[in-house]
């Protein structure tokens, strides 16, 4: 892949560029949360309970008088952390499983791919719910469980890449030079198999953020008082008739975030392979 | 008498194909090949696409395990070697590929590609490797300024030179050149062929030169072996091949070489149709359904022996 060409194509794609800008913006917001948030997200002010958006509280306040904007800003840290760590875990497992299956083939491949099929049979959200119910809700448990249930796509991608790459002549040449399996995989196959993984990881971040929000919404994810978009929504649901802002703004945050990761991922995919666009 | 560097005995490779219900039929890519290559010579291996040339090349380099027969390199049987010894022997035999666009890892710089052979075998320190790589580049006619570039920055001919440099890195005795010029323009072909010839002289290399192009083969080979449907049908010194070839298939192949002579009347091709599928090889002489000459019942029923009709001239045909 020629990097300059990739960039040129990516930049021409407006949707992808806006995805990139939004994602970058959200990373900055999450990192700079303590400086950007107008209030302490956990500061309770019972005189200001359920205030609608105003100049003082731009996105209103919740049932305990906490500033919703500040909570959403701090909530973005949870989303970002869960998104990246869960996808990191999932991608690493997927790379390992896919690489072994694609490289060794035969019964190794058969066994690993049947495991993938088996994992894909479970409805992911309910599997996660069951595991969380046993292990107890915590942000670390969520990240690990999302990672452990989200590696199958990457494994299939990497396996397919390895299967076609290992017949390529530069790989055969390295074998003829006497290269060991580890060198072949690490130096010749893996770097050439990474581009589709990048796309899938970017899209995976969106998925992981969505799952975290859903879990927190159900009360099985990030526990209050730590703010997360999902648990802000829970409060919003209980008061939806009297405080629309409590549901609306975290919903918008989730929507925009998931959408920008999807736009970014699709943009990368199209820039890698321009034929896909038509 | 020059020593034999490479010898195959009854070498075969069959592939099991996948069928609609699991295992399918066997594909006989290489069948009972007896071949020997003398140190310092170039043996040209010619045949149509799909006749098993490349598979044979990979069997010889132990890149593919044979399903039958044996390969001897410098007197050692490759298929029986323990892994560490095989790795040592890999330094002695290398391969150059057809497609200069897929034979170099697109993620590595020229320096990384050319230093890799030394890294694999733990040869030399940093400074030594640098010096060796510089020498290699010079040897194949590239400049040191190319070292930090990536393969996509080179033309096809330059990339083929890089592939040759990589094959030379460990100072091998044998190079299997698998269609090394087929993907190149004719003018570049000549350059690469000259380079290969120069390198052979300078380093005393032995080549197994695989090609489907007879003009290339007869330009570079000392001996020529003709392959059809996984079997050798004729092997002869080049002079004999040019003037006194025997097998009807060899004859037909040569008749099909286009001559740059517009006055020459059009000659209908002697060979009709495609070679039969290697999944379903005809009984008897594998060539008999396409053979333009008289067909004895023998041709249809019995596989002809591969026998020496004159000194160093081997043919597999009932009629000769």
Image (spheres, rainbow, N blue to C red):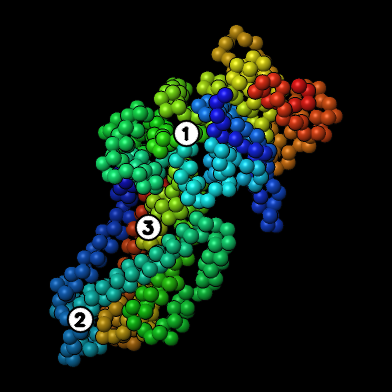
Q: What residue is shown at x 58% (from left), y 43% (from top)?
A: B77
Relative image position of residue B272 (x, y in whole percent):
71, 26
Q: Residue furthest front?
A: B1
Q: What residue is shown at x 26% (from left), y 33% (from top)?
A: B145
Give the chain of mark 1: B
- Seen in the picture, residue B204 relative to B103 is either above or below; the reply is above
- Disc 1 crowd rating (10 Å Cα; few below 14, some 14-19, many 20+) is many
Residue beneath label 2, please? Answer: A41
Q: Evaluate whether label 3 is on the same chain as label 1.
A: no
Residue beneath label 1, please? Answer: B173
Side of B250 relative to A142 (left or right): right
Q: Nearer the viewer, mark 3 or mark 1?
A: 1
- Image quadrant occupied by the C terminus of chain B: top right
Q: Evaluate whether label 2 is on the same chain as label 1.
A: no
- Image quadrant occupied by the N terminus of chain B: top right
Residue A139 visible (yes or no): yes
Q: What residue is shown at x 25% (from left), y 88% (from top)?
A: A63
Relative image position of residue B182 (x, y in whole percent):
51, 29
Q: Residue furthest right?
A: B297
Give me the disc on residue A243.
Answer: none
Give the chain of mark 3: A
Q: Evaluate whether label 3 is on the same chain as label 2.
A: yes
Disc 3/disc 2 C-alpha distance (Å): 34 Å
Give the chain of mark 2: A
Residue beneath label 3, please? Answer: A198
């Amino acid at each position: 892949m020629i990097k300059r060409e990739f960039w040129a194509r990516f930049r021409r794609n407006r949707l992808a560029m806006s995805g990139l800008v939004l994602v970058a913006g959200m990373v900055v917001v999450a990192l700079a949360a303590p400086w950007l948030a107008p209030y302490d997200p956990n500061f309770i002010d019972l005189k200001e309970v359920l205030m609608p958006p105003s100049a003082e509280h731009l996105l209103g306040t919740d049932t305990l008088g906490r500033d919703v904007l500040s909570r959403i800003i701090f909530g973005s840290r949870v989303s970002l952390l869960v998104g990246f760590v869960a996808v990191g875990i999932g991608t690493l497992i997927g790379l390992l499983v896919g690489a072994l299956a694609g490289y060794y083939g035969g019964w190794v491949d058969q066994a690993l791919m049947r495991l993938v099929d088996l994992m894909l049979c479970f409805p992911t959200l309910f599997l996660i719910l069951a595991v969380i119910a046993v292990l107890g809700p915590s942000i670390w448990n969520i990240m690990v469980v999302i990672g452990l249930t989200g590696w199958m796509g990457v494994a299939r991608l990497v396996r397919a890449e390895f299967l076609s790459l290992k017949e390529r002549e530069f790989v055969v040449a390295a074998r003829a030079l006497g290269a060991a399996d580890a060198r072949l995989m690490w130096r010749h196959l893996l770097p050439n198999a990474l581009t589709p993984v990048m796309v899938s990881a970017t899209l995976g971040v969106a998925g992981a953020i969505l799952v975290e929000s859903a879990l927190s919404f159900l009360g099985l994810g990030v526990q209050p008082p730590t703010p997360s978009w999902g648990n802000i929504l829970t409060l919003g649901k209980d008061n939806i008739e009297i405080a629309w802002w409590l549901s609306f703004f975290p919903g918008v945050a989730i929507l925009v975030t998931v959408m920008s990761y999807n736009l970014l991922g699709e943009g990368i995919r199209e820039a890698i392979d321009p034929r896909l666009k038509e | 008498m020059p020593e034999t560097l490479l010898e195959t005995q009854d070498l075969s490779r069959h592939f099991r194909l996948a069928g609609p219900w699991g295992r399918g039929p066997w594909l006989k890519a290489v069948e009972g090949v007896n071949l020997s290559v003398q140190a310092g010579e170039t043996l040209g291996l010619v045949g149509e696409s799909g006749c098993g040339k490349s598979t044979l090349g990979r069997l010889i380099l132990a890149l593919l395990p044979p399903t039958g027969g044996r390969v001897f390199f410098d007197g050692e049987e490759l298929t029986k070697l323990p892994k560490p010894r095989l790795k040592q022997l890999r330094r002695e035999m290398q391969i150059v590929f057809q497609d200069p666009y897929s034979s170099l890892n697109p993620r590595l710089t020229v320096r990384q590609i050319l230093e890799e052979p030394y890294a694999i075998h733990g040869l030399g320190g940093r400074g030594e490797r640098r010096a060796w790589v510089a020498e290699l580049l010079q040897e194949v006619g590239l400049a040191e300024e190319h070292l930090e570039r990536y393969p996509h920055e080179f033309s096809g001919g330059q990339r083929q030179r890089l592939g040759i440099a990589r094959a030379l890195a460990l100072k091998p005795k044998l190079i299997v050149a698998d269609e090394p010029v087929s993907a190149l323009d004719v003018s570049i072909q000549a350059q690469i062929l000259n380079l290969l010839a120069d390198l052979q002289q300078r380093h005393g290399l032995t080549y197994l030169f695989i090609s489907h192009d007879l003009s290339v083969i007869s330009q570079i080979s000392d001996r020529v072996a003709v392959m059809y449907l996984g079997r050798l049908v004729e092997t002869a010194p080049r002079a004999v091949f040019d003037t006194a070839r025997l097998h009807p298939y060899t004859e037909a192949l040569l008749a099909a070489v286009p001559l740059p002579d517009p006055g020459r009347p059009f000659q209908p091709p002697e060979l009709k149709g495609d070679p039969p599928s290697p999944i379903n090889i005809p009984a008897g002489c594998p060539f008999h359904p396409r053979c333009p000459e008289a067909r004895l019942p023998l041709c249809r029923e019995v596989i002809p022996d591969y026998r020496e009709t004159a000194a160093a001239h081997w043919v597999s045909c009932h009629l000769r």
